[in-house]
Image (spheres, helix red, strand yellow):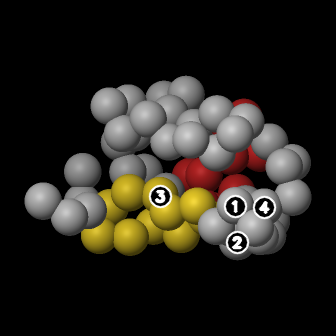
Amino acid sequence: MESIPAVNKEACNKCGLCEMYCPDAAINQDLDVDLTFCKGCGICAHECPKRAITMVREEK
């Protein structure tokens, strides 16, 4: 994984689209991202209407 989702919880409107579209069920309704399952695909960030999720470089 080269990037991971960073969530701005204050910008989120709790629509649930990130959770619905995540193919790996790596994000939940509380916006907690399980990096064990996250593949860094960025679908959650792309689907977020409020742009509350951005993809950032993973720190190693």
User: Circle 3: is it few (<14), some (14-19), or many (20+) Cα within 10 Å?
Assistant: many
The residue indicated by pointer 1 is: 9
* Residue 13 figure quarter: bottom right
**Residue depicted at x 58% and y 61%:** 7
The answer to whether the residue labelled 4 contacts the one labelled 1, judged by CB atoms less than 8 Å apart, is yes
SS label for mark 4: loop
Residue underneath mark 2: 51
Is 50 placed left or right of 25 in the picture? right
* Residue 5: numbered disc: 3
Q: Which residue was labeled with disc 4?
A: 12
Would you place residue 19 above or below residue 48 in this image?
above
Q: CA distance from mark 2 to mark 3?
A: 11 Å
- Earlier in the chain: of badge 1 and badge 2, it is 1
Q: The residue under label 2 is which amino acid type?
A: Arg
Q: Nearer the N terminus, badge 4 or badge 3?
A: 3
When asked about the image quadrant of residue 48, the answer is bottom right
Q: How many labels, in total?
A: 4
Dot 4 amino acid type: Cys
Q: Where residue 58 sits in the image (x, y, percent)?
A: 26, 62
Front position among marks 4 and 2: 4
Real-space Cα separation, disc 4 to disc 3, in angstroms: 13 Å
> Under tag 3, what secondary structure?
strand
